[in-house]
Amino acid sequence: MSGRWWETAVFYQVYPRSFQDTDGNGVGDLEGVRRRLDHLQWLGVDAVWLTPITPSPDDDFGYDVSDFRGVHPELGTLEDLDRLLSDAEARGLRVLLDLVPNHTSDRHPWFGDPAHEDWYVWTARPNNWLSVFGGRAWDWDARRGRYYLHQYLPSQPDLDWWNPAVRREFLDILRFWFDRGVAGFRIDCANRVIKDRELRDNPPVGPDMHPAAARLGQRPLYTTDQPEVHGIYRNWRRLCQAYAPERVLVGETWFFDLERLAAYYGNDDELQLNFNFLLTHSPLDLDVLRGVVENTESTLPAFAWPCWALSNHDVSRFMTRWCGGDERKARVAMTLLLTLRGAPFLYQGDEIGLADQPVPPDRLRDPLDARMPGQLRGRDPERTPMPWSPGPGAGFTRPGVEPWLPLGSDWRSVEEQRADPASFLNFTRALIAERRANPDLRSGGYRTLESPPGVWRYRRGERTVVTLDFNRWESGIERQ
Ligand code: NOJ
């Protein structure tokens, strides 16, 4: 693979804390990811995205970064990462990390350091901005006698991207990891990093807004998607292009307006891939999903490569949310993901049809349950450990060790499914193999075909027709 390698790649998201524990502390680690590369290679994916591995007090499990150039001691060391990168490369797998440019942990040395004070956003008179994680987005800092901005937890202060020093620092952070062989980054909160310079109040929601985006009761006019964000990404893309193979940037572009999503591709000079959450947040409804795909096809510019995921570490798994545990539905959904034009991202466990696992109240770890009781669902059920084999510890950790989140029991392990040719895992693997073997599926265009009610048929490339039957929950791929 070379050139625009991300356009033919199947991506796989690893949540390292829950992938494989090797030191028996109940938390997955980088050595665990390395030891499970066999699985990823056997499955047939091309690239792996690791959610944050940098040091963090873990108020938001890695998304509160306290050092952008290190490895979280619970996950390993820089040497472990280097070993993982070189073993992955030997198997033809690329490794992406997660970059969190919008905010740091309040325990990042910058936040307490007077010399870095202007790296954060301060005000004497808070505006009406709200935190995505509940409550006001401003908290009082007694030391400075001012309020600081946090669009997420109070312990995640927002950086001030109007400050050129912040911009220089992040280019340097990117360089640091790219030089080590990291193939790219998923960019956390990609559309939020720069805020209105005048800190104007956000207006109320309008009827045109997607319900998921309207949740806060405000239109995020001044907190997201400021025009100046595009200059930042043009600089980053230039840096990516200075490497061979080109490094890839994947935007967590969390909004529901396809034209705004399209803007993050720039003129093919910004982020190469941008998650399309319209699909993820749609119901499993043929008309709705087909509408999202058709609108995406007609809205994104010709050079832009779409980017799709059914699950991730922030939303209920598709097996639960879409399929209610029905494997027939899950096969149709997986066929969709792996036959659409664009980059498919599997979330660890998707390949075995893993469902959300129940997490009892005394085991909850995600702070969202406590911050917004009854309003915002915590994310622990989709973050439980990978079940690799039957038996105590499920192959994730040593028998007798309590994993950081419960394993649950509503699953069939990787080992059991590997041995069963008719399993969901082998179905997923066959789809990935088919995609790899068929240039139409890898890179051909998309066109909706006439089909009876309840059936979605589309052509990929010249000769491949995909049929998704939402009446009988069956799917097929035909080469004509
Ligand atoms: C999006 C990440 O995916 C999520 O897990 C995190 O809590 C927020 N951004 C804040 O960084």
Image (cartoon, rainbow, N blue to C red):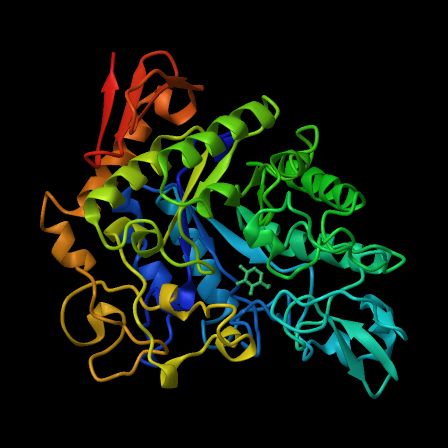
* Residue 54 location, quadrant: bottom right
Which residue is found at the position 22% from the left and 75% from the top? 393
Give residue 132's quadrant in the image.
bottom right
- Residue lying at 17% horizontally and 76% vertically, measured from the top left: 392
Residue 70 position in % (x across, y down): 59, 68
Q: Would residue 386 appear left or right of 69 to someone viewing this image? A: left
Q: How many marks?
A: 0
Ligand 1 lies in quarter:
bottom right
Image position of 396 (left or right of 9): left
Res 305 seen here: yes
**Image position of 310 (left or right of 122):** left
Q: Is residue 3 visible?
A: no
Q: Quadrant of residue 143?
A: bottom right
Q: Quadrant of the N terminus?
A: top left
| Residue in front for this viewpoint, 107 or 193 | 193
Could you say where residue 302 lies in the image, as x and y percent from the top left?
A: 58, 21
Task: State the residue lying farthest toward the front.
Answer: 207
Towards the viewer: 288 or 410: 288
The image shows residue 73 at horizontal and vertical percentages of 50, 76
- Image position of 204 (left or right of 322): right
Q: Position of residue 35 (x, y in %)?
A: 31, 61
Vertical order, 16 against 168 (above or below) = below
Q: Residue at x 69, y 66 (%)?
A: 151
The residue positioned 80% from the left and 62% from the top of the image is 160
Which image quarter holds the C terminus?
top left
Residue 476 drawn above or below residue 120: above
Q: Is residue 347 above or below residue 61?
A: above
